[in-house]
Amino acid sequence: MAQFTRADNCEYNICMNCEITFCELREKEVVNMCDGKRLGRVIDLAMTCSGHVIGIIVPGDKSLFKNITNNNSIFIPWQHICKIGDDVILVNLANRMIPSS
């Protein structure tokens, strides 16, 4: 296991031979380290045509008064993922990246 520090001062561990399925990812809660806000569980992956994952997508704010078809999903670039743990994914997002409700 190698440890790196990225330009945004987010330390994270990378296991070079780690593999994870989408089913495992979608069971994990995504939490923003900047403010501790729970962003929900992974609902989708964004990938390139060659199959490289470029980010995850989590649901936006939910409200009883919002239209069901309203799409407030949040795209989180893969480089903003700091740690994928047993039950949580820690991300480092500036507040300006998260749509306001």
Image: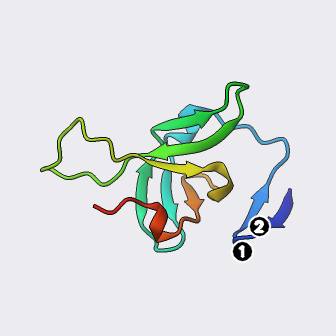
Give 59 or 7, whichever is nearer the viewer: 7
Residue type at mark 2 is Arg
Residue under the image location 71 percent in, 74 percent down: 9
Which residue position holds label 2?
6
x and y percentages locating residue 3 in the rendered image: 83, 64
Splitting the image into 4 quarters, where does residue 85 fall? bottom right
Q: Residues within 10 Å of mark 1 (few under 14, many from 20)?
A: few
SS at mark 2?
Answer: loop
Circles 1 and 2, Cβ within 8 Å, touching? The answer is yes
- Would residue 5 appear left or right of 8 to someone viewing this image? right
Where 69 sits versus 1, above or below? above
Give the structural element (helix, strand or loop) at label 1: loop
Answer with left or right where residue 80 lies relative to residue 63.
Answer: right
Hey, what amino acid is under mark 1?
Asn
User: Relative to 84, does residue 24 appear above or below in the rendering?
Assistant: above
Q: Name the residue located 39 percent from the left edge and 46 percent from the top edge.
A: 73
Q: Is residue 83 among what the camera can see?
A: no
Query: Is residue 100 shown above or below 51?
Result: below
> Residue drawn 20% across and 37% down?
68
Give x and y (percent) for residue 57. Answer: 49, 43
Tell me the tag on residue 75: none
Query: Residue placed at 68% from the left, 25% from the top?
Result: 49
| Residue 48, x across and y down, in percent | 67, 31
Q: Is residue 39 visible?
A: yes
Task: Give the quarter of the image for residue 13.
Answer: bottom right
Residue at mark 1: 9
Q: Residue 31, image x and y in percent?
A: 49, 61
* The C terminus: image quadrant: bottom left
- Crowd tier of the residue under label 2, counting other residues whose Cα lies within 10 Å: few below 14, some 14–19, many 20 or above: few
